[in-house]
Amino acid sequence: MLWRAGKHEFRFPRPTLVMGVLNVTPDSFSDGGKYFSLEAALEQAGQLIREGADILDVGGESTRPGATPVLIEEEIRRVVLIIRQLAALVRTPISVDTQKPEVARAALLAGASIVNDIAANRTDAAMWRVVAEFRAGYVAMHMQGTPQTMQQNPSYTDVVGEVDAFFTDRLARLEQAGVRAEQVVLDPGIGFGKTVEHNLQLLGALARFGHHGRPVLLGVSRKAFLGQLTGAADNPAARLPGALACAALAVRDGVQLLRVHDVRETVAAVRVAAAISAKRRE
């Protein structure tokens, strides 16, 4: 299986890719404001790479439940300078975490190679045309509703089946917009319009999504449902043990990418999980 992202290529099977989160926002749920300045963001990017990040995911708009949308111009201001600087300094692929086609275009022009789109449930094809134009990698995430509405009584008849059908539909729509399957990664969107029970059902069924023939990305790092399960509801950083448990099980189930805040710890957990999984297949 091949994933193309601009000038970058990833061939699977291979060790699980770790995508390090770099939030350049003042209000992210997990690290809001810590890396809002250019100097702090560059320092953190270097740290993530030293810890083993295979991809840097730069986001200029918080997508926590109920977050206030950011104006296009402001989001561009937040992400473009850091992406341009990073692209000149490192060879690590850069992803832009955005819902806006205008921001995606500006980020790709600045040196990003991947668009991480939480709003792949969109009906307008403008974002997909940008991705097709740049031949960028594209992460298509499932979300019910928007960040402003997604946790207002999320409801499914069969959450696993509905997310699976969503992936089938998105791959077809993306192809119609000129985005090749080899550019696409699928993300079930843990915590985006899901209850704790929905999240657990999806985590238990990750292997099912492999039939699409595309890499699967999992993002559970510091998510609220982990706090609800472990009693760390008020401290995102204390949710790390739960996130590492999810990461290890995801490796067993064939997930190819993990989006995380805690890179060093995740890389270590992934190596151990991969070594054990290899012995199970012998």
Image (spheres, grey):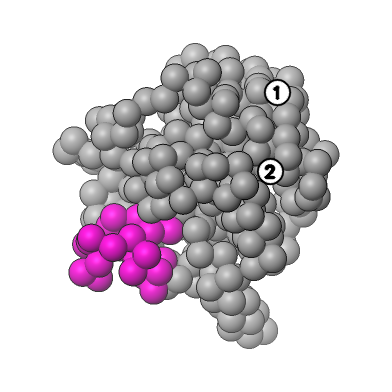
Visible residue check, residue 200: no
Classify 10 Å Cα crowding around label 1: few (below 14), some (14-19), many (20 and above): some
**Of the residues under marks 1 and 2, which one precedes in the sequence?**
2
Nearest-to-viewer mark from 1 and 2:
2
Question: Regarding mark 2 in the picture, which secondary structure is present there?
Answer: strand
In reply to whether residue 240 is colored magenta, the answer given is: yes
Residue name at image x 51 percent, y 64 percent? 262
Q: Nearer the viewer, residue 213 or 114?
A: 114
Which region is colored magenta?
Answer: 221-243
Q: Nearer the viewer, residue 236 or 118?
A: 236
Residue 78, percent from left and from top: 55, 31
Residue 57, percent from left and from top: 59, 45
The residue to which callout 2 is attached is 94
Amino acid type, label 2: Ile
Q: Which mark is residue 132?
A: 1
Residue name at image x 31 percent, y 34 percent? 67
Question: Regarding mark 1 in the picture, which secondary structure is present there?
Answer: helix
Q: Quadrant of residue 236?
A: bottom left
Name above or below for residue 182 compared with residue 277.
above
